[in-house]
Image (cartoon, rainbow, N blue to C red):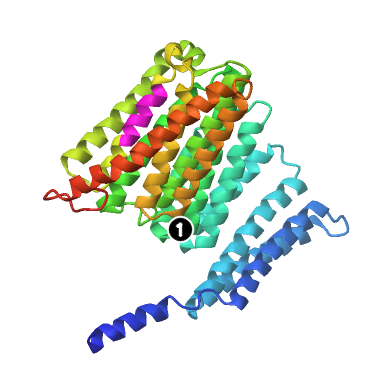
């Protein structure tokens, strides 16, 4: 059914996808990691029987041997060995920083040593196009910002965003999905630490609201890119899953805080003052993207419109008259979880659908435990939610099919 040239191209494509990393390559990578830990343990041992000069020469020789081996392996067409040797060199570089500080008793904070290690590793990754080195750099930068935030005089570390952008650009440049996943996880860590720190210091989830609105804005942009442009090189759906995980991680503690200490978003609104403009601006941008998507008939315009709806709903929940109404917050959270399930099914993204089902289960359990003493009211809420879901299951397919039957409405997501 196909011509010979097409057959050759298909077979070549299949051959390029086979195999993967061999066991010897995995063993080499794990061995390099063990050597890195051996070097750091060697520094921590502070072996007095060896002079400082000999210890320095030993680590310097190991450092240059690693980079020299990487150069030789790359010139002989062994890219994986070269990448592994670069990773070993970056690990020995960090051990050398520790050893120099130990020998010469250089006064400084541990965070400064980790920052210097991360900066050197980022430079090595950029100069050698090394994916393992970039992965190590991302982990070091995340460790650095966690150490800064959790220090005695710590706080929100905005400088991390500059380093994160550099690492994210490197992941995009190297086309590394693994590094992109690490960048997404690192940003979640930074955002969570920032919100928790501000909540503890200011006794408010104001910055949590800002982060949630920003997440809905970024989801809308990812949907716009996923429809046609592919700015993230196919990482759009994974990015949306991480953003949804961030939203859930921020809303769960706020929901618990709201019931345990009655510190709801209405109280936060009184403390926000001028800062209320930030969520409003984020909502306006999300709504503008949704309007633009509808005007251009973008494939994901329905979900982009819902991003604006949920962003506005989060801001509306800061009004005490709204948040004090029975089951209003719970209804919004349930609706968001249903939307996530629907979006994951439409995009055939299993991780997103799993997040939606998990969110639905968590909200249902939260409602049950919070209102266990008034089971009649709880049963009424469940009854109403069930009827709405059944009606939605009956009405939505007809609405969608009616839209698909119209001319010009054939694209994905109509």
Residue 155 image-quadrant placement: top right
Decide if residue 18 is in sight here.
yes
> Is 213 situated above or below 34?
above
Q: Residue furthest right?
A: 49
> Is 107 situated above or below 277?
below
Decide if residue 218 is in sight here.
no
Q: Residue at x 57, y 44 (%)?
A: 142
Image x and y of residue 243, in percent: 45, 41
Task: Kindly state the secondary structure of the residue where label 1 is placed.
Answer: helix
Q: Which residues are magenta?
A: 306-315
Q: Is residue 235 magenta?
A: no
Q: Mark 1 sits on what residue?
A: 177
Camera-nearest residue between 342 and 396: 396
Image x and y of residue 202, in percent: 57, 17
> Is 126 situated above or below 324?
below
Q: Residue furthest left?
A: 407
> Is 29 situated above or below 135?
below
Quarter of the rendering occupied by the N terminus? bottom left
Camera-nearest residue between 80 and 326: 326
Q: Is residue 4 left or right of residue 158?
A: left
Image x and y of residue 217, in percent: 35, 35
Q: Residue at x 27, y 31 (%)?
A: 287
Q: Residue at x 40, y 17 (%)?
A: 276
């Amino acid at each position: 059914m196909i011509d010979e040239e097409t057959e050759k191209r298909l077979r070549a494509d299949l051959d390029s996808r086979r195999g993967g990393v061999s066991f010897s390559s995995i063993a080499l990578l794990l061995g390099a990691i063990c050597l890195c830990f051996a070097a750091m343990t060697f520094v921590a041992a502070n072996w007095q029987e060896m002079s400082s000069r000999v210890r320095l020469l030993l680590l310097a020789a190991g450092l240059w041997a690693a980079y020299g081996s990487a150069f030789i392996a790359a010139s002989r067409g062994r890219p994986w060995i070269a990448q592994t040797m670069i990773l070993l060199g970056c690990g020995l570089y960090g051990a050398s920083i520790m050893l120099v500080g130990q020998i010469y008793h250089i006064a400084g904070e541990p965070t400064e040593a980790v920052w210097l290690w991360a900066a050197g590793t980022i430079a090595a990754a950029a100069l050698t196009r090394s994916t393992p080195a970039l992965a190590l750099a991302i982990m070091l930068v995340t460790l650095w910002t966690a150490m800064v935030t959790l220090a005695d005089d710590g706080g929100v570390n905005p400088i991390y965003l500059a380093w994160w952008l550099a690492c994210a650009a490197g992941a995009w440049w190297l086309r590394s999905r693994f590094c992109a996943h690490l960048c997404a996880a690192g940003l979640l860590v930074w955002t969570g630490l920032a919100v928790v720190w501000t909540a503890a210091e200011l006794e408010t989830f104001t910055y949590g609201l800002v982060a949630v609105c920003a997440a809905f804005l970024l989801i809308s942009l990812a949907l716009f890119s996923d429809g046609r442009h592919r700015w993230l090189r196919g990482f759009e759906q994974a990015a949306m899953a991480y953003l949804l995980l961030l939203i859930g991680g921020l809303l769960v503690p706020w929901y618990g805080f709201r019931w345990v200490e009655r510190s709801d978003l209405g109280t936060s609104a009184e403390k926000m003052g001028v800062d209320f403009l930030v969520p409003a601006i984020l909502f306006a941008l999300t709504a503008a993207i949704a309007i633009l998507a509808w005007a251009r008939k973008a494939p994901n315009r329905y979900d982009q419109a819902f991003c604006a709806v949920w962003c506005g709903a989060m801001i509306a929940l800061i009004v005490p008259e709204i948040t004090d109404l029975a089951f209003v917050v719970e209804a919004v959270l349930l609706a968001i979880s249903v939307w996530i399930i629907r979006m994951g099914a439409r995009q055939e993204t299993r991780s997103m659908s799993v997040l939606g089902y998990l969110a639905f289960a968590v909200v249902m359990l939260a409602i049950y435990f919070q209102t266990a003493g008034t089971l009649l009211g709880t049963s009424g809420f469940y009854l109403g939610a069930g009827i709405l879901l059944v009606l939605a299951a009956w009405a939505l397919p007809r609405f969608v099919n009616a839209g698909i039957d119209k001319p010009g409405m054939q694209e994905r997501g109509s």
